[in-house]
Amino acid sequence: MADLPPRLSDLLCFAIYSANGAFNRAYKPILDGLGLTYPQYVVMVALWEKDDVTVGSLGERVFLESNTLTPLLKRLEAAGLLERARDPKDERQVRIRLTDAGRALQARAADAPRRIAETLDCGEAEERIRALAAEIARLRDVLEKNAA
């Protein structure tokens, strides 16, 4: 008897993919109030952690290729949240710096993770959420390493 194809509900990749879609939908009303899309929010969080970085290093941190990241950065620049400038030490590099408005947005966005945790509404302890995030990140890293 031939193996049956896997059921969608049995695929780990689909569970993660569909959870990602659910997170995007949950974040949307929160981020709409900030004037950000989810990918823009991820980039801003990365810049709030470490400002004045190259496009390449930012792309590595947020797992976005340059052809996806550059238009996103241009939109954030047009919104007045960041500045892009050639690195004076290496003209091939473009550096990204938050503007005052970009730094100020951090305070308005600070409660987004808490609001998302509230939408989980499943009594999950903060430690369990952190452990799950760490396990998913470990899975991602293993997949990245083995796919190379």
Image (spheres, grey):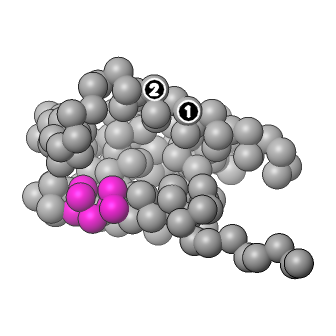
Q: Which mark is residue 135?
A: 1
Q: Secondary structure at mark 2?
A: helix
Residue at 41% across / 48% down in the picture? Answer: 43
Looking at the image, which is closer to me, 4 or 15? 4
Q: Residue at x 27, y 50 (%)?
A: 81
| Element assignment for label 1 | helix
Query: What residue is shown at x 55% (from left), y 39% (from top)?
Result: 136
For the residues labelled 1 and 2, say whether their Cβ atoms are less than 8 Å apart. yes
59 vs 38, left or right, is right
Position of residue 17 in the picture relative to residue 12 (left or right): left
Instruction: Judge whether 14 appears above or below 129 on screen.
Output: below
- Mark 1 is surrounded, within 10 Å at the Cα level, by few (under 14), some (14 to 19) or many (20 or more) other residues, namely few
Label annotation for residue 131: 2
Q: Residue at the location (55% across, 33% down)?
A: 135
Label drawn at residue 36: none
Quadrant of the rendered structure where residue 2 is? bottom right
Instruction: State which region is magenta.
Output: 22-28
Q: Is residue 134 above or below residue 5?
A: above
Q: Residues within 10 Å of mark 2 (few under 14, many from 20)?
A: few
Residue 23 in view of the camera: yes
Q: Position of residue 148 (x, y in %)?
A: 85, 49
Q: Quadrant of the N terminus?
A: bottom right
